[in-house]
Amino acid sequence: MRNPRSPWPFTARAEEFDLVRRNLSAGRRGIVVTGAAGSGRSRLTAEAVPEAMRDAVLVVDDAHLLDDASAALVHELALGGRTRLLVTVREGEPAPKDISRLWEENLLPRLALAPLTEHACAELLARAVGGYVDALTVRRLYRASRGDLRLLRELVVAVHAGGDLNHVSGTWTWRGTPPITARVRELVEETIRDLDTEERDALELIASGEPLGAGADAPGALVAPAVLERLRARGLVTVDDRLVHPLHGPVLRAAAAEPSLSGGPSGRRRAPRASALAAECEELAARAYTGRLAEIPRGVGERMAEDDTGWDEPAMPEFCARRARVARLRGETREAMAWSREGLRRSPHHRDCLAELAHAAAYVGDLATAWQAISRGPAPAGDAWTRPWPVSGAQPPAPAGDTRSPAPDTDTWRRASAAVPARTWALAAEGDLDGALRSALGVAGDGLFGDDLFALHDVVRLGSPELVADRLGELADRAEGDLAPLLARHARALARRDGDALDKVARGLADLGLMLHAAEASAHAALVHPDRRASQASRNRASALAGACQGARSSALVNLALPRLTARQRQIVSLAAAGLTNRQIAEQLTVSIRTVANHLCDAYARLGSSDRAGLEGLFTVGLRGDRTGGHR
């Protein structure tokens, strides 16, 4: 592992770097760069203005700290136009009037640095520690740092120093309580240093027992409503009286003489963890089936997973499975795998965690993980149910001639059923679309599983909407929420080859938070639009939506990205892009290595690629239409 105390790489600011360099070139006056604390203003300045340029450019870092005379001098230099200026200003801090006039009077262009995205944070962390960082760790560090790269670095340094950054199966993970070092506390305290005494006291009370309880002696009774309103207005407290910043609670509790007014999680002023966890599991299930996935609140289950607590809570693996399901539906495939693995850490044979791991792994082409997870799930005796098994009828029959194990009873079939949707997409990832379609139809065949809505829609996603459109319509008539009617409209629109209707479905799915499903609907629209311009617009939307899905590649996206290939070539190219060798592909598809090599060579020629190293990028490029662009 790289030492996290060593200088971190400069990444994810290519566009901003280019803009600054252009405005510092000959004939330009310069630029003002603004951004919040820790946004990387000074690092961008150092990278954009190396030592060789320092004689030609005047750099004024943290210009909000200048006195009035110095600020007036900078303004005069900008008016004169003979000195190239690079001025940085911290957002949220009062700046001298002459500094703000630089962009208000259009003397210099202004670049407002936005916080890094979570994806960019993941890239930065991977380069900083020298390896892949699991999605839950990325999400936790991203939330805790809240865009402050200084805090992000200090957290990683502290976690590493405490021995809590563990390398497991090629992935760096962090579970445990946040380390509150002196530097971490200093950076977090910066965000609340301007609170008055009432507000600070109220924040400490909330930290001691969030959410605020009721009763005469509860923290909620000790905080004046007007103070709470001010804290909410500042964005420090939510409407249900929880702290917004994940580190405010640990920092304030560490600084307080009494760390908790409630005596810890089991105190009488806090709801029992088990009840809260059960409620969150129900809430996640309801969100999944009604489509309320645009924003998922962080609750007690997520905090216990992050802090590596709750090992005595039997519902934690189920929470992890349901959180994985929600992540998968949102298109957060890597995060879904991380949640599944967290559940399996706590219960190694948990059925739903294994199923979710297999499902998400199939989406990203990690077929070894997918089939391994499927085979570990509950199944009848014998080998007929590991890979692959038939799925038709209420009780799947044993293979012909197999006298070792009778057909399972209904209860056993229910227990084994969780892995069947995952198996559908593992078969699709292998290119066996007929097998995947049979699997999906079997899951939705008789209403046995309670997953009819998504199982039926899987048939639509696999390109056979006419088989299930009527049943989806029936479900939509009696289901709650906006999701079921939208999935039914997807089936009808694709069956009619109505590109405009598919575009509307894609927008609706994206609004609900189902990004992968939305990308697929846009991909379907791109393939059926008769107008080339409309087709390209749908293709562009599919590309943008798929880019948010953490490497997911479903059959609809592969078909759109690689339209010039035969079905067998798409199958082999998908497996090669997932990292399989020619030998592994040959063994998986039961063909010769030479056949695999020949198909790949032909695919390279059709796609304009020279070798397998560029295959991964072809999916995204193909979606944008830059290479294949084929309109059908």
Image (spheres, rainbow, N blue to C red):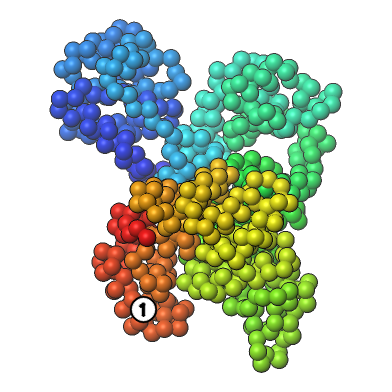
* Kind of residue at disc 1: Val
Give the quarter of the figure containing the C terminus. bottom left
Count neighbours of disc 1 (C-alpha within 10 A) and say few if under 14, some if 14 to 19, many if 20 or more: many
Whether residue 593 appears in this view of the structure is yes
Q: Name above or below for residue 27 compared with residue 582.
A: above
Occupied quadrant, residue 96: top left
The quadrant of the picture occupied by the N terminus is bottom left
Q: Quadrant of residue 465?
A: bottom right
In the picture shown, does residue 567 fall above or below 562?
below
- The answer to whether residue 298 is above or below residue 340 is above
Q: Nearer the viewer, residue 374 or 176?
A: 374
Q: Where in the figure is residue 351, as x and y percent of width and height?
A: 68, 65
Q: Secondary structure at mark 1?
A: helix
Q: Residue at x 37, y 22 (%)?
A: 89
Q: Position of residue 113 (x, y in %)?
A: 38, 31
From the top left corner, tell me how far across and down residue 406 is, in percent: 74, 85
Does residue 426 sit above or below 269 in this rendering? Answer: below
- Residue pictured at 72% horizontal, 61% vertical: 450
Residue 135 position within the rendered picture, expressed as x and y whole percent measured from the top left: 52, 51
Q: Residue at x 30, y 13 (%)?
A: 105
